[in-house]
Amino acid sequence: MSSSDDIAYSVDVSQSADEGNGDIAYGPLNFYRDKNPNGISPTLGSDAGVPYLRLAVAKDAYGAAVADKEDASQRDRCELRDGKLRLGTAVAYSFEMRVESGFPEVDARFVCAQIKAPYYDANGGSPLIALRIEHGRYFATIEHLYEPNDAPFRDGSEQSRYLSRYVAGTGCKGAARAFDHHVFGNSLADFEELQVRAVLATDRCGLPPYLEDQFLWCSTGVEVTHGVPLPDDIHRWWRFTMRLAATDKKDEDGVVELLLGEPGAAADTLVASASGEFGHIGYDDPAVNTGPPPDRAHQYFKIGPYRDKLLIWDKAAAAIHVRNIRREAWGDGEAKRRRLRSV
């Protein structure tokens, strides 16, 4: 694991280095021009003398060559990303964010910030935790690992250890509302998206209506504890903190927390915490391994717009403002993860 000193950083968004090819470095965070299709290059703004970055996507904003043509044909991005840490490193990210006025309110996902890790191979990253905007409202999700041994076949059907159908009006008692998008292929090499997405937190109004048709399951693969709801006002500055002590041993659980605070406040308030198998540490034996080898699993942070390329977005820019981005070691995360294993 990395030391605390290696992990910690604080980003001054007013200081940047233009790499000359469209890439821009903000200390340890990087905007890669060819990995951000239809991302407008970040621009510096100021609110009451405090600098912030405007991160925005818009249709046809960037038409030059991109690193991944398939991804560019499906998604718009304007993301800053940091370097990779070994999966299981206990870490906390905090940042202040507001949503720009005029943000399109549509039935489509828009990820603002996320911590990603593999779920089926070394490059198959998915968000262990993600802060999103869905139809103009904050929404947070987590993803837990879901493998063939979690759903044995009986009488021609999968018999899940964790999932049961959501029934409207009854809720998910003792479980988390979930969206099941795993894919068990014909062989280990064909496995993709070995995970289930679960609701971590919503605002006071609950699940955005259009997602009622997607989150059709209840999952006991994670245990979620709720605190305060996410804020209703997305256009006001808020400080968000994501804490993560992900899975660092095969078949062992990790911990994630989301906190909320006022900019400048001395303390934050818990929005939600969860335990479960977050990320994929593979087996040492490649004959049975469904994920990356243990020494090749990593996690990393991204902040900025990520959305599907859909007609519903129209041509209006979708932008967020971010500032005071920090990373530090999460010492309590190591202790909380150990306590899970002693139960």
Image: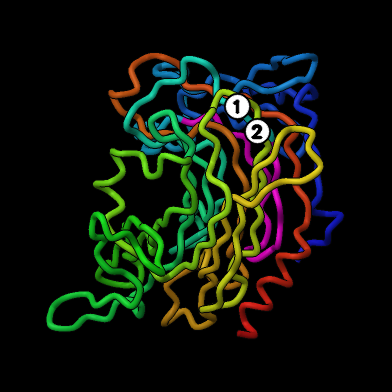
Asked which quadrant contains residue 49, the reply is top right
Measured as percent of width and height from the top left, residue 190 is found at: 31, 65
Would residue 126 be visible to someone looking at this image? Answer: no
Q: Which residue is mark 1?
A: 98
Query: In the rendered image of this protein, does residue 181 appear above or below residue 23?
Result: below
Asked which quadrant contains residue 264, the reply is top right
Residue flagged by tag 1: what amino acid is it?
Answer: Arg
Asked which quadrant contains residue 174, the reply is bottom left
- Whether residue 82 appears in magenta in the rendering, the answer is yes
Measured as percent of width and height from the top left, residue 236 is found at: 61, 25
Would residue 310 be visible to someone looking at this image? Answer: yes
Of residue 18 and residue 318, the one placed in the foreground of this image is: 318
Q: Secondary structure at mark 1?
A: strand
Q: Left of 112 or right of it: where is 15?
A: right
Query: In the rendered image of this protein, does residue 204 appear above or below residue 57?
Result: below
Of residue 224 and residue 250, the one placed in the foreground of this image is: 224
Q: CA distance from mark 2 to mark 1?
A: 7 Å
Query: In the rendered image of this protein, does residue 224 appear above or below residue 343?
Result: above
Residue extending farthest to the left is 155
Picture disc at residue 21: none
Extent of the magenta region: 77-95
Query: In the rendered image of this protein, does residue 235 appear above or below residue 316?
Result: below
Q: Which residue is mark 2?
A: 238
Q: Which residue corresponds to the image point at 71% horizontal and 56% vertical from the top-left?
A: 91
